[in-house]
Image: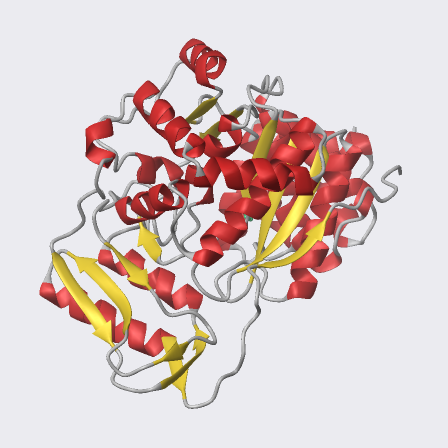
């Protein structure tokens, strides 16, 4: 067996790690025998020298198995988003695809970001229980085919250690390291069919289409190599998805979408992701899946399934008969000029939600479920004087005024139209390229 120092030397010198090396490295990350300073050095070496495709395959598999036995999958399809502002698609997709006979069980986290994670959002519904025993999850899946719960046990614990160190060693934005991190967790979660929503734009990890395509292709190849069906959908994140950013406010918008309404970009993206999930799970064409998906949204079966799911996990259905209540101080940004929305600093909009209290700076911070905002501005949209561009829900006048001020900095209006992409969907990667070594 190589000394751990030799593994760092190999990566520093651009020599590919063997299967055995990759196993040894990941074991030492998981059991702690590789100290932080050596793991940091290895991460920086990998960042600067790059990793070969075979190393990426080996490392992903080893990280996926670092929590012991790979989880038994309860659903046949899984989805993952690389993350963005206003992304509430899981809240809609889980009931939507399961209403079409495609079971989906999702273990979610709380999330560190501009808003809480899916679990925080769901906890805006009074009574909703996130901690279910494995038996309870299994029973619920048998009964209604959908569950969204807190993670039990540790999924890919080696990734947790690597991610924490990447965060503080400027090694987050490396395509191979991101692909290993995401795909190890997807492999560990066990689903045979995986749809990846890879976000592109100034509110995402990948700001260019080119880099997003590279990440998507790599993740599809990793999944295919490990015997999974994977499709990656590249979607816009140069503006928030939908209007709502926050927790309860995003649940409200998700419910509108499940009732056949909601913002056009959110509906388009949900339909696209759902079509791929249903088509993969049922082995039908995307076009045939589209008919089922649109029907489920527009004729009530997706919303009916949502209510069954929320009730099964203890949520109070009376509370969602109307929109969930939001923070009491409501302020609008009303445009005083005519023109067009030229650009949106999506990251800055996420920061506005965070500053209102919708997200966490540290993992043990508490989240205010009622604050948030509706950002109505979309790139390329024409604006008239008197149009409401955003509405803020805050706990104090001062927070609300500060949020409106920051929104005015983040959204640029101008006299001429810069145009805009007509679709939220930028590309689809379904390649089954040769994946053998
Ligand atoms: N999401 C992850 O889970 N890991 C990364 O490295 C980046 C995004």
Q: Position of residue 364 (x, y in %)?
A: 29, 40
Q: Is residue 412 above or below residue 189?
A: below
Quadrant (top left, top right, bottom left, bottom right) of the C terminus: top right
Q: Is residue 154 above or below residue 322?
A: above
Q: Residue at x 74, y 50 (%)?
A: 217
Q: Residue at x 53, y 51 (%)?
A: 269
Q: Image quarter for residue 135? A: top left
Q: Position of residue 26 (x, y in %)?
A: 66, 33
Check the image and name the residue furthest to the bottom.
Answer: 415
Q: Residue at x 51, y 61 (%)?
A: 237
Q: Image quarter for residue 239? A: bottom left
Quick check: can you spot residue 46? no
**Nearer to us in this view, 360 or 90:** 90
How is this picture coloured?
Answer: secondary structure
Q: Position of residue 316 (x, y in %)?
A: 22, 27
Locate residue 75 relative to residue 331 in the image: left or right: right
**Nearer to us in this view, 308 or 10:** 308
Locate residue 168 relative to residue 243 in the image: left or right: right
**Nearer to us in this view, 230 or 113:** 230
Locate residue 335 relative to residue 179 in the image: left or right: left
Quick check: can you spot residue 396? yes
Q: Is residue 308 above or below residue 225?
A: above
Locate residue 281 relative to residue 348 in the image: left or right: right
């Amino acid at each position: 067996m190589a000394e751990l120092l030799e593994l760092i030397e190999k990566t520093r010198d651009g020599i590919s790690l063997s299967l055995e090396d990759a196993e040894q490295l990941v074991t030492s990350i998981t059991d702690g025998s590789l100290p932080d300073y050596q793991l940091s050095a290895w991460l920086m070496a990998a960042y600067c020298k790059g990793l070969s495709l075979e190393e990426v395959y080996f490392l992903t598999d080893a990280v996926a198995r670092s929590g012991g036995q790979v989880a038994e999958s309860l659903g046949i399809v899984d989805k993952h988003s690389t993350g963005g502002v206003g992304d509430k698609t899981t809240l809609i997709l889980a009931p939507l695809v399961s209403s079409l006979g495609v079971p989906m069980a999702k273990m979610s986290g709380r999330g560190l970001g501009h808003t809480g994670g899916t679990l925080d959002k769901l906890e805006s519904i009074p009574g909703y229980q996130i901690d279910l025993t494995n038996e309870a999850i299994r029973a619920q899946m048998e009964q209604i085919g959908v569950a969204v719960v807190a993670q039990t046990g540790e999924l890919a614990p080696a990734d947790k250690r690597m991610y924490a160190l990447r965060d503080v060693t400027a090694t987050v934005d490396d395509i191979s390291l991101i692909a290993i991190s995401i795909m190890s967790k997807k492999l560990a979660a066990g689903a045979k069919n995986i749809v990846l929503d890879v976000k592109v734009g100034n509110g995402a990890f990948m700001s260019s289409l080119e880099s997003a395509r590279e990440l998507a292709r790599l993740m599809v190849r990793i999944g295919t190599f490990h015997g999974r069906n994977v499709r990656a959908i590249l979607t816009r994140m140069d503006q928030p998805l939908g209007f709502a950013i926050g927790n309860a406010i995003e649940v409200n918008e998700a419910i509108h979408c499940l009732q056949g309404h909601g913002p056009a970009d959110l509906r388009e993206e949900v339909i696209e992701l759902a079509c791929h999930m249903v088509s993969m799970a049922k082995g039908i064409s995307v076009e045939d899946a589209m008919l089922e998906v649109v029907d489920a949204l527009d004729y009530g079966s997706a919303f009916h399934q949502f209510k069954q799911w929320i009730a099964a996990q203890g949520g109070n259905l009376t509370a969602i008969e109307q929109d969930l209540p939001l923070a009491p101080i409501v302020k609008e940004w009303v445009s005083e000029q005519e023109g067009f929305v030229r650009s949106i600093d999506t990251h800055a909009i996420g920061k506005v939600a965070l500053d209102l209290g919708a997200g966490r700076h540290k993992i043990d911070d508490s989240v205010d479920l009622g604050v948030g905002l509706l950002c109505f501005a979309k790139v390329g949209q024409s604006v008239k004087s008197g149009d409401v561009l955003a509405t803020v829900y805050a706990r104090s006048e001062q927070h609300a005024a500060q949020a409106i001020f920051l929104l005015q900095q983040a959204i640029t209006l101008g006299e001429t139209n810069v145009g805009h992409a007509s679709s939220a969907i930028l590309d689809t990667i379904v390649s089954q390229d040769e994946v053998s070594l």
